[in-house]
């Protein structure tokens, strides 16, 4: 079993010398930062990354492979059977560096038993863990019981076409995956206040990201002769009305199951409430709403006003004012429900709603044989952890695969503290060396355990 977390001491003897660690370090040092604007992408970095990956994993690269969306990769590892193919996903692009880092963001330093740098958790650690598991199994001449596909995206962080291109390629080849596994959950330490047992949370659905633009128009004019209720005032009123109204809260089924599984490990006063989460769902939902924005987001569709626009000059009354609204649609609600809520809350026919993007929540993946395989693999490698389903708040490339697959799961086999989870897309991102090696073991075990 792994020692957990940065203990302030040195890495466990030998672990940092594992060749897989040097591979991850080398890949962290290549800054594959994606951007919505292709002009601003450092294509040379992505090409260098591809060459380094090929150098590190020659057996994997000798398999049938297809380039996806310029720098992504789809690899086919034929198994004994093609009946229940499995897709293992990861992405090689990262978000830009922000904040003050304790160790250089593109340094890949190993300090205090951890590998530091942008992408260690999101998502190069996962990428290298998958590759190392496959490469070492290939080296032993192992044949998986089922076809294994590896799908590595290059545009995940900018919602690019990488994942949908991979889906199109699989569709063209007639592949209907038995299950798909992508980033998302983790072996989460400090998952819930008072619960000290790590929870192996497997995302079974994710919220749908939808964006609207509120827009009000008027005559504009000189700021010395303003009229009442101009575009800016209407938008301001719309925003305060939206801020004062929330969509109804409730507990979706996967969250009820998550609470049930955490219950035996929760502090006594909470135990009864959590183990009866199904019956007490309304009470629990209200408690979560009161517990703060993060907990509240678990219970409902959220609506956030983000961008604002108005007059371009201090002495000019705006002819058009606008506000961007970012909505995360909860499973059980639809885009239409959310738009209706916004329209009703704003209550002003002079405020127009323009749809920017509309995505429904992902369907809930079943907890059948494939889910049980993930649970069993978690229990084997992380015996102290409790596997559980959950609803993901963030969006992943996995959502595109729901088109061709009923069982889409989101889980990275790494232990993560609360601080580590908060470091994702922020600063001081790091992955424990032992935890990284456990992740490789987890993937090996998963591939070896595919049923015939
Ligand atoms: Zn990611």
Image: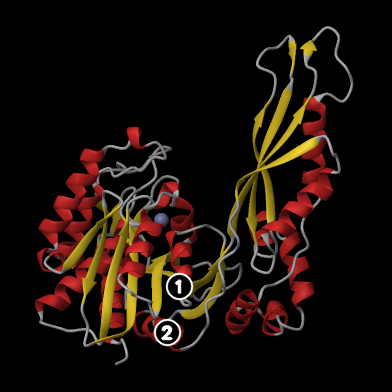
Instruction: Give the image's coloring scheme.
Output: secondary structure
Q: Position of residue 186 (x, y in %)?
A: 44, 68
Q: Circles 2 and 1: CB distance less than 8 Å?
A: yes
Q: Is residue 85 above or below residue 369?
A: above
Report the side of 324 relative to 35 (left or right). Answer: right
How crowded pointer 1 is (Cα within 10 Å; few <14, some 14-19, many 20+) is rated as many
Ligand 1 is found in the corner quadrant, namely: bottom left
Q: Nearer the viewer, residue 333 or 16?
A: 333
Report the side of 123 relative to 47 (left or right). Answer: right
Q: Secondary structure at mark 1?
A: strand
- Residue picked out by circle 1: 409
Task: Name the residue located 38 percent from the left edge and 51 percent from the top edge.
Answer: 429
Q: Position of residue 203 (x, y in %)?
A: 50, 70
Which circle's residue, 2 or 1, is located before the other in the chain?
Answer: 2
Q: Is mark 1 within 8 Å of ligand 1?
A: no
Report the side of 221 relative to 264 (left or right). Answer: right
Q: Position of residue 54 (x, y in %)?
A: 14, 57
Name the residue at the bottom extreme: 452
Q: Is residue 112 visible?
A: no
Q: Is residue 437 above or below residue 123?
A: below
Q: Secondary structure at mark 2?
A: helix
Task: Name the residue located 59 percent from the left edge and 63 percent from the top edge.
Answer: 361
Report the side of 259 relative to 244 (left or right). Answer: left
Task: Name the residue located 53 percent from the left edge and 57 percent from the top edge.
Answer: 394
Task: Name the residue located 59 percent from the left edge and 61 percent from the top edge.
Answer: 207
Quadrant location of the N terminus in the rendered image: bottom left
Q: Is residue 248 above or below residue 44?
A: below
Splitting the image into 4 quarters, where does residue 413 fall? Answer: bottom left
Q: CA distance from mark 2 to mark 1?
A: 9 Å
Q: Position of residue 223 (x, y in %)?
A: 79, 10
- Residue picked out by circle 2: 370
């Amino acid at each position: 079993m792994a020692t957990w977390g940065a203990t302030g001491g040195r890495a466990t003897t030998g672990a940092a010398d594992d060749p897989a660690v040097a591979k991850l370090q080398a890949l962290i040092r290549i800054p594959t930062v994606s951007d919505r604007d292709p002009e601003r992408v450092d294509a040379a970095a992505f090409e260098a990354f591809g060459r380094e990956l090929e150098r590190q994993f020659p057996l994997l690269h000798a398999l049938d492979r297809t380039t996806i969306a310029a720098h992504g990769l789809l690899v086919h590892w034929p198994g004994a059977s093609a009946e229940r193919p499995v897709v293992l996903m990861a992405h090689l692009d990262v978000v830009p560096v922000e904040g003050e880092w304790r160790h250089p963001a593109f340094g890949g330093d190993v300090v205090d038993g951890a590998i530091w740098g942008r992408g260690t958790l999101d998502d190069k650690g996962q990428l290298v863990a998958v590759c190392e598991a496959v490469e070492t199994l290939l080296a032993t001449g192992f044949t998986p019981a089922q076809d294994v596909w590896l799908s590595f995206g290059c545009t995940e962080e900018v919602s690019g076409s990488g994942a949908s291109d991979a889906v199109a390629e699989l569709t063209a080849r007639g592949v209907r995956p038995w299950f798909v596994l992508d980033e998302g959950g983790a072996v989460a330490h400090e998952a819930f206040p008072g619960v000290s047992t790590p929870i192996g949370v497997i995302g079974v659905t994710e919220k749908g990201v939808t964006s609207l633009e509120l827009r009000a128009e008027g005559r504009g004019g000189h700021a010395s002769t303003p009229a009442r209720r101009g575009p800016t005032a209407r938008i301001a009123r719309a925003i305060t009305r939206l801020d004062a109204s929330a969509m109804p809260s409730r507990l979706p089924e996967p969250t009820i199951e998550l609470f049930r599984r955490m219950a035996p490990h929760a502090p006594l006063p909470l135990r009864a409430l959590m183990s009866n989460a199904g019956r007490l769902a309304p009470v629990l939902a209200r408690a979560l709403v009161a517990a703060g924005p993060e907990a509240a987001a678990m219970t409902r569709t959220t609506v956030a006003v983000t961008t604002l626009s108005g007059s371009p000059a201090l002495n000019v009354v705006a002819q058009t004012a606008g506000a961007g609204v970012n909505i995360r649609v909860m499973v059980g609600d639809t885009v239409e429900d959310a738009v209706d809520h916004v329209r009703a809350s704003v209550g002003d026919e002079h405020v127009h709603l323009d749809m920017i993007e509309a995505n429904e929540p992902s369907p809930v993946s079943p907890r059948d044989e494939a889910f049980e395989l993930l649970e069993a693999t978690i229990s084997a490698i992380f015996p102290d952890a409790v596997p559980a389903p959950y609803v993901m708040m963030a969006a992943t490339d996995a959502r595109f695969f729901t088109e061709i697959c009923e069982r889409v799961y989101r889980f990275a086999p790494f232990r993560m503290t609360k601080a580590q989870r908060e470091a994702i897309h922020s600063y001081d991102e790091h992955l424990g060396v032992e935890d990284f090696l456990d992740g490789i073991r987890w993937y090996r075990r998963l591939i070896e355990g595919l049923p015939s």
